[in-house]
Image (cartoon, grey):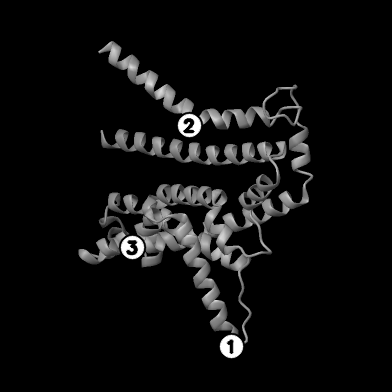
Amino acid sequence: MKKNGLVSRLFMLLVFLFLYAPILVLVVFSFNASKSKAVWAGFTLDWYVELFQNRTVLEALQTTLLVSVLATLIATVAGTAAAIGFFNLRGRTRSVCLAVNNIPLTNADIITGVSMMLLFVFTGQVLAQWGIDFRLGFPTLLIAHITFDIPYVILSVMPKLRQLDPNLAEAAQDLGATSFYAFRRVVLPELMPGIVSGMLIAFTMSIDDFLISYFTAGSQTSTLSMVVYSMVRRRVSPEINALSTLLFVVVVTLLVIVNVRQTRQDKRRMVHGN
């Protein structure tokens, strides 16, 4: 038994090493004083300083944060409302709606990106006949991010709806509360952990997206991931290491927050259950 446990731990260590060794190398060389990708020449923060003096990167960062925040807020509201609507459905109708909701999650990003680009181009051609100028740009990028964020919010809120006591809202209404007041003061606080988890996941997916953004942003709008891709095509600069390190830290931080919240919720549920 001890031998099997040791082998299992060793295998798990090798898996994590295989997954994260390249990222560790990237993080280390983002502090390298030399432009060399193989020789360590000393510790420096110069590449981070140059990164934040790069106007292209700063504009892309602003666009990325703006799109991510707006898409997350809109997707959270729409996804929560959709989850409540799905939950109130019955039988096969609910199963069909949930299956349709899962399609963007299982579908390849490149298919989603190309299909949305074609949809936006077609819509632009139709609207052009009415004198409306609709091109690929920030609005289409925002719509695309909202579209692929909503399913994550729905999947995060649905388990909380299943755990919700259906008699709570009715009891509040029996005590004189209106439907909206009962939802705001009774139902919504119960759903809030799932809503916050869905919001954090949606923000993480939005700030990290490249493929869908690449096909729907147009030629005048660039996100941070698109700037990284264009920089890599020219040459691998140490600034890319610094930028990638910052992106990795942000994404990992958000995922840790989601997991910590979920762990605390599970512990509270076990304590109350006991």
- Can I make out residue 110 in this image? yes
Mark 2, residue position: 19
10 Å crowding of disc 2: few (<14), some (14-19), many (20+): few
Name the kind of residue labelled 2 in the image: Leu
Mark 3, residue position: 100
Mark 1, residue position: 130
Given contact means CB atoms under 8 Å apart, are the residues at marks 3 and 2 in contact? no
Between marks 2 and 1 in the image, the one whose residue lies nearer the viewer: 2
Q: CA distance from mark 2 to mark 1?
A: 52 Å
Secondary structure of residue under mark 2: helix
Report whether 242 appears left or right of 72: right
Report whether 172 appears left or right of 18: left
Q: CA distance from mark 3 to mark 1?
A: 32 Å
Name the kind of residue labelled 1 in the image: Trp
Task: Indicate the position of residue 144 as horizontal and vertical percent values.
Answer: 52, 63
Q: Closer to the N terminus: mark 3 or mark 1?
A: 3
